[in-house]
Amino acid sequence: MQTYIALIRKDADSDFGVEFPDFPGCVTAGRDLDEALAFAREALELHIEGLLEDGGPLPAPSGLETVMADPANAGAVAALVPAPATPTRAVRLNITLDEGLLARIDAQAATLGTTRSGFLAEAARQAIGPAGPLHRRRRKSARG
């Protein structure tokens, strides 16, 4: 399993910020360290998924010594975050959405620092997961 270095920073008046040196733009934050690390795993998964969907390669994980040798990383705490176990092959599809809805999706994806595809994939995962409303509806209708 590949792991990537996450750098954690905390100012007195802020949440715990997390960034990944190997994935510029992949950032998140959490109120406490546990939440920040949980969000870091999710952010890394979505970022990698977006890269793969866009046909981009994944970078090789940087070494800790290399990352910490950068003066910009002084004062940060390093944590290892596992990459998704087995990323599946992305499949391109063509869908039709209302123009206003698409604009809202793109704006929210940009706010979250992800791609349109990554945002829609995560929304689908949440909707069809074990506790998702679509899953509950499907089980209910299967019973009769």
Image: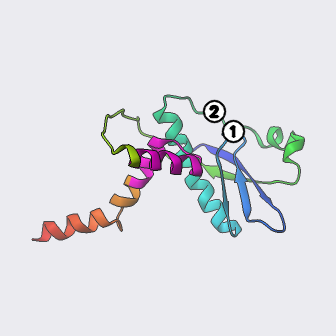
Rendered location of residue 118, percent (x, y): 47, 45
Residue kind at label 1, given as amino acid type:
Asp
Look at the numbered discs 1 and 2 and tell me whether their residues touch, using CB distance below 8 Å.
Answer: yes
On the rendered structure, is 143 left or right of 79?
left
Distance from disc 1 to disc 2, alpha carbons, whole Å, reads 7 Å
Principal secondary structure, stretch drawn in magenta: helix
Residue 22 bears which disc, if any?
1
Rendered location of residue 62, percent (x, y): 72, 37
**Residue 56: quarter of image:** top right
* Magenta residues (range): 101-123
**Callout 2: SS:** loop
| Residue position for label 2 | 59
Rendered location of residue 85, percent (x, y): 50, 46
Q: Is residue 35 magenta?
A: no
Which residue occupies the foreground of this view, 36 or 116? 116
Residue drawn at point x = 54 percent, y = 41 percent: 48
For the C terminus, the image quarter is bottom left
Residue kind at label 2, given as amino acid type:
Pro
